[in-house]
Image (cartoon, coloured by chain):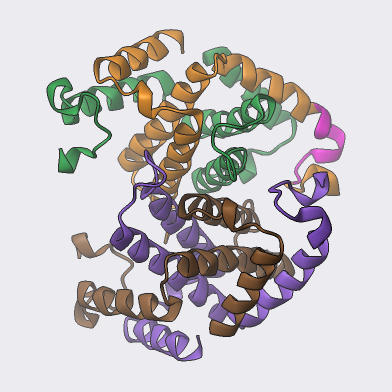
Chain colours: A green, B orange, C purple, D brown
Amino acid sequence: MNDVTHELRDFVSERDWSQFHSPENLAKSISIESGELLECFQWSGPDYSSAEVRDELADVLTYCLLLADRLGLDPKEIVRQKLQRTREKYPTEKARGRSTKYDRL
Amino acid sequence: MNDVTHELRDFVSERDWSQFHSPENLAKSISIESGELLECFQWSGPDYSSAEVRDELADVLTYCLLLADRLGLDPKEIVRQKLQRTREKYPTEKARGRSTKYDRL
Amino acid sequence: MNDVTHELRDFVSERDWSQFHSPENLAKSISIESGELLECFQWSGPDYSSAEVRDELADVLTYCLLLADRLGLDPKEIVRQKLQRTREKYPTEKARGRSTKYDRL
Amino acid sequence: MNDVTHELRDFVSERDWSQFHSPENLAKSISIESGELLECFQWSGPDYSSAEVRDELADVLTYCLLLADRLGLDPKEIVRQKLQRTREKYPTEKARGRSTKYDRL
């Protein structure tokens, strides 16, 4: 994602917007945009507009990348680290085919 | 992000979890995890735990990557396409230094 | 809801918590708790725990009442006012049996 | 809130909308609207529009009342019951003046 992050950085700095991009404001923005993503599925789960989902997902991802960049985190790396821990919390033999939360497995 | 997506795919398929990963369920999951991310900033904006933010951001990103993969979307590409449209909605000369929404600029 | 609001006020003031209850922090809290409510339906819509839904809904409502109180708003009154406007946006003859948003009706 | 709930019920039934109001869809709606409420505080915490906050809070409350009604719950009663348990989790002597979560008190 490195090159996209650079494009986002340029976009923000050309507009002098980094003053608004505190970690807290970015976290609020991720929540706001994920609400808009969810709205694509508000009344009917399987019956959604792909174009709208794509746009709203892009917005959530954009703020995620901005927050990662702000905190000096590598998005790929933190997903991978978390995945390692999730693997341990959900061993295949116990978790297979079940959506049960790890603390009730 | 391609190789992380592959790791996520393996993780999901080893647990036979793709049956739970409808686009709608993934959108709900993004919302739920972004609420947990926001919780890191609930009572105090600037005073947050970096480790917790990293973990919760990783969760949001994970579900974003899973949703993109489910819909056959390239995360980088959709962020870039959206950025192009946002550039047009927020021309530098009008938007510089202002957090005003485009429809009020 | 007046008497519940009084109980909530006492609860907050006994703990000297109104310093944390800025409108912004309460709005974040409503989002956070509504994520926890949504978690009751994360992987399976119709198959939820009534006790958990009740508890999480109570949390969302609690922060809504606290925010209304903080802003000097009567919860009943604002719901009623909004309903009046929603009635006009969704006239029965156009909206009956359809979940379409008003701007597409 | 009883009389408002009756008005909401009439509003929904006149439009034959109860078919859309599954508990899950109402929980999604609460999340979506709480994101819109949070948007009032996106870039600037203390500098918000009271009229917009009032409207968005009304939307969150409306869906909360609809969900409570759908599940046969009394909103006042569930807030009060939860408050009783929260009182026990946050005894005044330990919690006074602190925003620490109960499991770290």
Residue D89 visible in the picture: yes
Above or below, comparing residue A31 to residue A84 in the picture: below
State the residue at coordinates (42%, 61%). Answer: B43
Q: Position of residue D24 (x, y in %)?
A: 47, 50
Quarter of the rendering containing residue C77: bottom right
User: x and y percent of residue A5 in the render?
Assistant: 57, 21
- The quadrant in which residue C24 appears is bottom right
Left or right: A21 as drawn, with respect to D95: right
**Figure quadrant of the N terminus of chain D:** bottom right
Q: Is residue D86 magenta?
A: no
- Quick check: D73 above or below B11? below
Q: Quadrant of residue D74?
A: bottom left
Residue C67 located left or right of residue D50: left
* Viewer-side residue, D72 vs B1: D72
- For the C terminus of chain D, the image quarter is bottom left
Magenta residues span: B88-98
Name the residue rendered at 63%, 33% in the picture: A56
Task: Please state which of residues A81 and C30 is positioned toward the viewer in this rendering.
Answer: C30
Residue appearing at x 57%, y 45% in the figure:
A35
Classify residue B78 as left or right of residue C92: left
Q: Position of residue A60 (x, y in %)?
A: 56, 34
In the rendered picture of this protein, how many numbered marks are placed on residues? Answer: 0
**B92 drawn magenta:** yes
Residue C11 percent location from the top left of the image? 35, 83
Return the residue nearer the eye: D93 or B16.
Answer: B16
